Amino acid sequence: MKNHASLKEVQRDLFSNKTSCVKIVREFIHNISEKQHLNAFVEVFSDTALIKAKEVDDKIKNKNQGKLAGLVVGIKDNICYAKHTCTASSKILEGFISPYSSTVVDRLISEDAIIIGRLNCDEFAMGSSNENSYYGPVKNPINESYVSGGSSGGSASAVSANLCHLALGSDTGGSVRQPSAFCNLFGLKPTYGLVSRHGLISYASSFDQIGPIAKSIHDINKVMDVISGSDEFDNTCVGSLFGQQKISSQKRKRFAVLKDALEFNDLDSRIKKQFENFVKSLESSGHEINYISLPMLEYLVPCYYILTTAEASSNLARYDGIRFGFQSQDQCISSTRSLGFGNEVKRRILLGTYVLSEGYYDAYYIKAQKVRNLLQQSIKKILLKNDFIILPTTPNLPFKIGKKPVNPVKRYIEDIFTVQANLSGHPSFSFPYGDSIENGFKASIQIIGDFFKEREILNTVKNVL
Ligand code: GLN
């Protein structure tokens, strides 16, 4: 199968009759079955994908196709698609068929993208290695003994292994950017409120955003143009449309380098080196570099885990086995939940319930909200004097499946560089930089910009790479 580098190339071949959507979908279905051992897909929607492919081929013949005609997309298993199963990779949602589609899926389909299947993830998007999934871990196609990252691990693995052109993930604390980084791909966490969350299974509603994972910046642009913008089903989703965002004509950009991230104890020295090379290349192309400090960096992971678990404990209260999903044999809510949720999800529900309980609410939940507020103010100040903040996406390269410390706190610390953008709501884009450091894995860099500046961010990265 031809490995198209971007949608532009796919459409060039489609419009010149070199291939067809049906052929492309068949080839992907073949690739998926060849690479089943990666465990990236939990279900392939062969029938509906082929029906849609035929429809798009007819539209192309009649020259009335949509903007994304021919783009084959995989969706994370927490994004609903009408009449298709969606489980958040949890036993508790076993057999749940969504009666409606998420806004993102509706918008993709109406522009003639083809949804090929649902992708493995950490249960309820809680994790950073895809080892918390009810369906088991996902392998990293770059080196199959390694994790693909998480929680959108299936999404990144599928794009990297050429099982679909692009995938959607969700990012609550890094789940689009970190697996993108682990699989040498591009991943965008949009501004909170740019993309509708309607039909996304909630983890922590004030953090969650859906974002694309792709092999090219071009495809990220194309998909953002279609999925962004206000939605009557999600009142946190504001009017701004990605396609209407202005790009500044100023060539010289001001980059704030987060000193505290570079001084972080557990930062892999080779990632640090690549990052420093990037900063040097920016400097030599005439950009302004400002080293800034964010002393609260070390408090961000605790703050994130207090607030997200609090929201999760409330969001996940709806899974009682009565109306949908798995139900234990004795039909008791407590045994349904004990058997239906995995260990990590249970840990987070307990933690969230604890931080919200009387007597601890002020000490944990309210305090963490204050830290979130302080962070938002600090980022605002930094972005008054700088166009972007840059830092590595992850402190470390992927690790071997089953090899990371089982101590959850040690694992949580790995999210130190990504949670910031979710706590403050800013857009953040991760891209691979430089040559492979080890086993084919590259370092990735994250660029954070002001609210609703995604186009500016993507354009800048395209120009500096
Ligand atoms: N790794 C983070 C967590 O475990 C982020 C998850 C996410 O973004 N969904 O919560």
Image (cartoon, grey):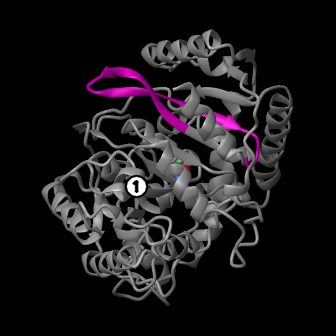
Count of number-bearing discs: 1
- Where does the magenta region start and end? 430-452
> Who's the residue at 29% across and 50% down the image?
138
Q: Is residue 330 above or below residue 453?
A: below
Magenta includes 442?
yes
Task: Where is residue 39? Give x, y as percent.
Answer: 24, 56
- Residue 407 to residue 175: above or below: above
- Provide residue 395's location: percent of width, then percent of height: 50, 26
Residue nearest the viewer, comparing 415 with 223? 223
Q: For residue 61, what is the image quadrant? A: bottom left
x and y, in percent, of residue 320 in the image: 51, 81
Residue drawn at (73%, 22%) of the image? 252
- For badge 1, the amino acid type reads Leu
Is 104 placed left or right of 384 in the picture?
Answer: left
Q: Position of residue 413 (x, y in %)?
A: 54, 34
Q: Residue at (75%, 24%) from the top-left corner?
A: 294
Residue 435 forms part of the magenta stretch: yes
**335 lies left or right of 13:** right
The vertical placement of 241 against 216, above or below, is below
Q: Is residue 203 visible?
A: no
Vertical arrangement, residue 264 with respect to residue 231, above or below: above
Which residue occupies the foreground of this view, 419 or 277? 277
> Ligand 1 within 8 A of label 1's CB?
no
The kind of secondary structure the magenta stretch mainly shows is strand
Report whether residue 331 is seen. yes
Residue that carries the numbered disc 1 in the rendered image: 166
Q: Is residue 213 left or right of residue 401?
A: right
Looking at the picture, tell me which residue is in the foreground, 306 or 25. 25
Given the current orientation, which residue lies at the most extreme left position?
Answer: 34
Q: Residue at x 42, y 67 (%)?
A: 69
Tell me the SS state at disc 1: strand
Q: Quick one: label 1, few (<14), some, or many (20+) residues within 10 Å?
A: many
